[in-house]
């Protein structure tokens, strides 16, 4: 008879490697893995509680209760999405407020998203936070309320007031994203903390203030600016001002809602962008003069995307621009797959191939997109 074989034993040191081998674990997967053996519990907890995403007040209450009963879990939290939304005329009671205070009192957070009801005068909840010095990423997201997802009968407006008090609470902030909010910017009386590198505005309307003041103190460190939607005139002025005072911006993504006769910030007298290397303009009424303005303003530009259904640049004009070597550093070009004559009409395969050949001779990679919604994710 053969001797009985020993049951295979999983070496505990392999557990972290197994968990790190896949980025798509679901919470229920972690729950099941924690039941395998006691050795699985610590590494599973570390990942399960690393990034809580809370969409209801009940979830907030349950997480706060868990932290109260097991404070050993607190150091695991590094990223937090806190986006509860109430129903109807429901008013927060003391239990919900106590839960929010517990969660906003977490220490060591690196990334925070406030949404749902907490996007209404979001600065109130930022002031409740206990430890903000470790936060490097902040996102205020008013999408649920701005799109009518809240069932409240009262008019609600996601909003944020950015002033010295808020700025100094986040001295190590590197990335600020505002989505679907009404923004008030209070000018600073003193130098604010420096270090902000990424600023993203998605459908933001400025109620009061001067856009560059939101990153006052970081004008030299800001490298990435992304602006989508918003009030056309106010945002145009804001973007122009940002380009004037933030000379080290290296990436600009500016997207408008395809409005005919809406020129880009590079039409007329273009701003000076000495360090801009990557530019995406989408939804603007671009023409050959727009390209000349970009070439004049951005001598170091390496990647250019001009997209939308109102672009009035023919493939022949694109080819002439590329052949002129107006942008000697250009290495990548993303163009629309058609021209607004009007109406918008797609290029023929021959026209696309001709432009492809011209770009190839200049060492430029060409991509033609049918819609600005297909913009590459790294733009």
Image (spheres, helix red, strand yellow):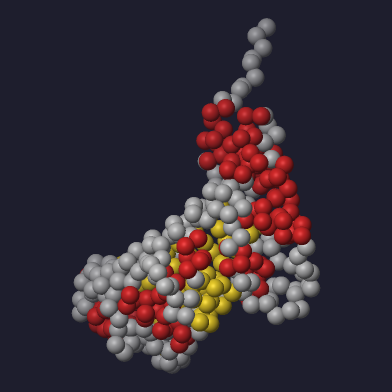
Vertical arrangement, residue 70 with respect to residue 91, above or below? above
Q: Position of residue 57 (x, y in %)?
A: 73, 60
Q: Position of residue 191 (x, y in %)?
A: 38, 67
Q: Residue at x 76, y 65 (%)?
A: 92
Residue 187 appears left or right of 354: right
**Is 184 or 358 nearer to us in this picture?**
184
Q: Position of residue 14 (x, y in %)?
A: 54, 30
Quarter location, residue 242: bottom left
Q: Residue at x 65, y 62 (%)?
A: 83
Q: Position of residue 370 (x, y in %)?
A: 46, 76
Quarter location, residue 192: bottom left
Q: Quarter of the image for the N terminus: give it.
A: top right
Vertical arrangement, residue 153 with respect to residue 87, above or below? below
**Is 297 or 371 nearer to us in this picture?**
297
Residue 87 appears left or right of 170: right
Q: Residue at x 52, y 35 (%)?
A: 17
Q: Quarter of the image for the C terminus: give it.
A: bottom left
The reply to whether residue 68 is visible in this rendering is yes
Vertical arrangement, residue 71 with respect to residue 182, above or below? above
Q: Residue at x 29, y 75 (%)?
A: 273
How many marks overall? 0
Residue sitting farthest toward the top: 1
Quarter location, residue 325: bottom left
Residue 236 appears left or right of 66: left
Residue 161 appears left or right of 248: right
The reply to whether residue 143 is visible in this rendering is no
**Is 8 or 267 nearer to us in this picture?**
267
């Amino acid at each position: 008879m053969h001797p009985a074989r020993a049951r295979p034993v999983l070496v505990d040191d392999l557990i972290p490697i197994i968990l790190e081998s896949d980025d798509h674990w679901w919470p229920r997967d972690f729950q099941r893995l924690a039941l395998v053996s006691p050795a699985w519990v610590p590494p599973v907890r570390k990942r399960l509680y690393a990034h809580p995403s809370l969409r209801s007040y009940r979830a907030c209450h349950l997480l706060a209760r868990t932290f109260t009963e097991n404070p050993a879990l607190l150091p695991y939290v590094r990223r937090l999405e806190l986006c509860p939304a109430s129903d109807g005329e429901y008013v927060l009671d003391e239990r919900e407020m106590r839960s929010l205070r517990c969660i906003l009192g977490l220490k060591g957070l690196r990334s925070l998203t406030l949404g749902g009801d907490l996007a209404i005068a979001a600065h109130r909840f930022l002031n409740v936070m206990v430890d903000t010095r470790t936060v490097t990423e902040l996102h205020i997201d008013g999408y649920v309320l701005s799109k009518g997802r809240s069932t409240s009968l009262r008019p609600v407006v996601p909003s944020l007031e950015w002033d010295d008090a808020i700025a100094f609470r986040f001295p190590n902030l590197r990335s600020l994203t505002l989505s679907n909010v009404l923004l008030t910017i209070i000018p600073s009386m003193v130098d604010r903390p420096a270090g902000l590198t990424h600023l993203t505005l998605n459908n933001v309307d400025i109620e009061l203030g001067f856009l560059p003041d939101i990153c006052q103190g970081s004008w030299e460190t800001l490298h990435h600016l992304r602006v989508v939607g918003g009030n056309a005139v106010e945002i145009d002025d804001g973007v122009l001002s940002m380009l004037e005072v933030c000379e080290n911006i290296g990436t600009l993504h500016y997207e408008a809602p395809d409005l005919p006769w809406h020129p880009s910030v590079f039409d007329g007298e273009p701003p000076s962008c000495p360090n801009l290397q990557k530019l995406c303009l989408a939804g603007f009424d671009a023409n050959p003069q727009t390209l000349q303005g970009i070439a004049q303003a951005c001598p170091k530009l390496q990647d250019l995307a001009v997209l939308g259904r109102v672009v009035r640049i023919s493939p022949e004009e694109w080819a002439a621009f590329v052949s002129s070597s107006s942008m000697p550093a250009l290495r990548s070009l993303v163009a629309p797959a058609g021209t607004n004559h009007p109406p918008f009409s797609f290029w023929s395969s021959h026209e696309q191939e001709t432009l492809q050949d011209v770009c190839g001779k200049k060492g430029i990679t060409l991509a033609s997109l049918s819609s600005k919604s297909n913009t590459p994710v790294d733009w």
